[in-house]
Amino acid sequence: MNPATEMREALVDAVDSAKGQVAFASAMSTSERPVSQQIVSYWLKRGFLPAELVVRAELITGVSRFRLRPDVFCIPKDLESIQAA
C-alpha cells in the first residue's frame, strides 16, 4: 500500500473514531482555529490532515500520528533499529 492510501485510510479511521465528520470537526476545533464539517470533507477528499493538527487528532481519536502523516512524523531509516530495541 502506498503512503497516500495509508494516510487516507488513517484519516477515515480518525473520523470514524470520532463518530463522523461533524463530531470530528467539533472535536478538532479550537477558538483559534474553528473546523467545519466541510473542511473535514475536503481533507478526506484530499487524503490527508494538515500536519499542524495531527497531534490533536491523535490525542482525540487514538489514531497514531505515524499513520496520519508518515511523511511528517517518520522515524529515519538509520534509527529504526534503535526504536525496535
Image: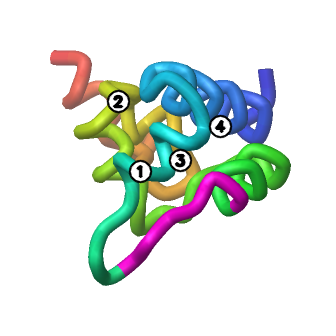
Q: Main SS type for the magenta part?
A: loop
Boundaries of the magenta span: 33-38
Q: Amino acid at mark 2?
A: Thr
Instruction: Please tell me which residue is depicted at 47% across the width and 38% down the height of the picture.
Output: 23
Q: Earlier in the sequence, mark 1 or mark 4?
A: 4
Q: CA distance from mark 4 to mark 3?
A: 6 Å
- Residue on which the image places disc 3: 69
Q: Earlier in the sequence, mark 2 or mark 4?
A: 4
Residue sitting nearer the eye, 59 or 36:
36
Callout 4–callout 3 Cβ contact below 8 Å: yes
Residue 61 screen position, x and y as percent: 35, 30
Which quarter of the rendering shows the N terminus?
A: top right
Name of the residue lying farthest toward the bottom: 32
Query: Is residue 74 highlighted in magenta?
Result: no
Q: CA distance from mark 3 to mark 2?
A: 14 Å
- Residue on which the image places disc 1: 26
Q: Earlier in the sequence, mark 3 or mark 2?
A: 2
Residue sitting nearer the eye, 66 or 85:
66
- Residue on which the image places disc 2: 61
